[in-house]
Image (cartoon, coloured by chain):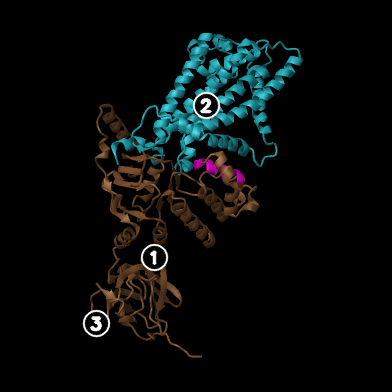
Amino acid sequence: MKNIILKAENISKQYRLGQVGTGTIRHDFNRFWHKVRGKEDPYLKVGAVNDRSSQAKEEYVWALRDINFEVQEGEVLGIIGKNGAGKSTLLKILSRVTSPSTGVIKTKGRIASLLEVGTGFHPELTGLENIFLNGAILGMNRSEITDKLEEIVEFSGCKMYINTPVKRYSSGMRVRLAFAVAAYLEPDILVIDEVLAVGDAEFQKKAIGKMQDISKGDGRTVLFVSHNMAAVKSLCSRAIVLENGITIYEGVTEEAVDFYLKSSSNSKLQNTYYFDQDLFKGKNVVLKKIFIYKECNDNIENISREDSVLFEIQVEKRYSEKIGLALRFKDDNGNYLFVTNNEDLEDGGITGNIIYCMKIPPFFFNEGTFLIDIIVHQHRKLIIEENDVASFIVTREKLALGDWMGKSKGALKPKFKWQIIKC
Amino acid sequence: MTPQENDTWLYEISSEKKAFDLNLKEVWRYRDLLILFVKRDITTVYKQTILGPLWYFIQPLFTSVIFTLVFNNLGSISTGSTPPFLFNLAGITAWNYFTACFTGTSNTFRSNAGIFGKVYFPRVIMPMSVTISNLMKFGIQLLIFIIFYCYYLLQGFQLSPNLHLLLFPVYIVMMALLGLGLGMTISSMTTKYRDLNVLVGFAVSLLMYVSAVPYPLSEARKKLPDYAADLVAYNPLTQIIEGFRYMLLDTGSFSWIGFLYVLSISILLFLIGLVIFNRTEKSFIDTV
């Protein structure tokens, strides 16, 4: 049996809405008065669910509510959720920046947190001095840093500037240096907030590689928060999904990511999407709806690889010139796959309500979930770009006995013509 | 998991606030950070200045000159057999250390919210580093005092430091404790309501006049109404400044009762400050 290194029990965090002012002091006194009499904090009983879009009716909000989870030693736990779901609050509590309103986190190891790279960098100090300062802030001691100094400098790629004040650095160099320090941190438990989304492509690759080394190679326990589903999938073994401050899913990463993607957008897995007509005020093109179906059948439920997939876009065209319509396809991690547009279509001179129809032949997509964005151009100028308007799932074709049952890699799996040429 | 294993948790994170959760072990673990903060504070203040650390000299010198001109020449406050300039320099050097500790720590939470909001380390490290780096500054300023002291000695003035000089380190500790205690209290109390910050700005400069910095306590007794003289006399800072001048210049007064009074007050204020600080550090980031 594996060792449980960290355990969160009923973690909740309440925040007050609005500003701190004279009104708050009344609540503070009331809270104090309850405490003096040995009673429970009266304001912990109230509080709204953390749903950002609805109008606040109460003065308190629960950023987190009754979060429970356990982390085993050597495990990499992903924490995913939409913006404002409570991920960062949870990380802040884990890294002891703030304390929970209720509940306890018990840990057997030291937690180091990377909520930001380069915390405490002082612009006047040189790169070298900042390595020591930043390292110490993150919890390393002097000898640890001295041991790894060469590697850190090497990894950052700022050797030339190491004795120059950091204020003369480019922002990219600063980030590299900061990440380099963080990468050589060796705590029992590492808490990371999306710090990967920095630096140029080369450095990102290096950073992700380093993260993989940390989590896989060294068997470190890591809690990782990210929006990048591909990164979560490749780094984490287990994940929890937060929504409005509540855990809505906990399990194996693949399943958790699927669950998150399905729940994260209302338009997900919708073959029909009606556009918000307000978007088109004063425009010559009005998109009405988009509709996805498989040939000979309006049923979206099971599009198989053997089916052709049809895309219909209902448009009210108010002027006679050509409009450029494009569909952009993405996989369920949000990676762009391809764009297809109507450039070969002659639609000049046509006005009124029309339907643009596009067909993708069978055996094009691999099995998986696909999302589409829609983009409209007019005279080479972008006029509308709507993301994630619709989505669909493609399932595998009927297999014969003895066929390979696994899923091949990649989002697309088109059939092309193969032949033999004798020479 | 068996119940026995539950005992092996290294630490817990919860909403509970213990009054005395000082966690000295952790502070010790972060000692390197403390040293680095001190180094940072000292090296960065006068970066890109030509005179550099000389600026540490200039401020007390100018203040002493002005004080001598205004209070001793213009206001004809008598400093006995001691040269007025040296009298003022001694008072200002000591006073500077207290105010530096006090103002430096009184905005610990607000000015470090950026770092505190991103990473955990024992927050006490910050005010501690301020106190220590100011000690360096104090040392440099004391050096000037000694230079002028020797100068006046050579001029033939009777300046006899006495045996109480042995208490010198205790006085420094008392000033540091007072500054820290008050500073930490203010800094904790201003995380949510910032009213006190406004006060600190002008209170410090006014406090100097109630602490017998530019005049001896005996003059206050002579010239001020009783209630004001008492106010000055019971101010622990007056006792410190007076004691300071007594041990260095043999002017003013010293009493063991006064000494014990200041010692206990500074320890008490320090402990109060520490407790409030520890209670605040856990979740101040939500209200700052």
Image vertical order of residue B269 relative to residue B130, above or below: above
Give me the C-alpha separation between circle 2 and circle 1: 58 Å
Q: Is residue B69 left or right of residue A69?
A: right
Labels 2 and 3 in the same subunit: no
Q: Nearest the camera: B7 or B98? A: B7
- Name which quarter of the figure residue A331 lies in: bottom left
Three-letter residue code for mark 3: Cys
- Residue linked to disc 3: A296
Image mark for residue A256: none
**Amino acid found under the numbered disc labelled 1:** Gly
In which chain is the residue bearing label 3? A
Disc 2 and disc 3 in contact, CB within 8 angstroms: no
Q: Is residue B162 magenta?
A: no
Crowd around label 1: few <14 · some 14–19 · many ≥20 (10 Å):
some
For the record, the magenta segment spans A128-139
Q: Which residue is mark 1?
A: A334
Q: Colour of chain B?
A: cyan
Magenta stretch, main secondary structure, is helix
Secondary structure, mark 3, is loop
Residue at 61 percent across and 26 percent down: it is B138
Single out the mark in the foreground, 2 or 3.
3
The chain displayed brown equals: A
Please report, as a chain letter, where disc 1 is located: A
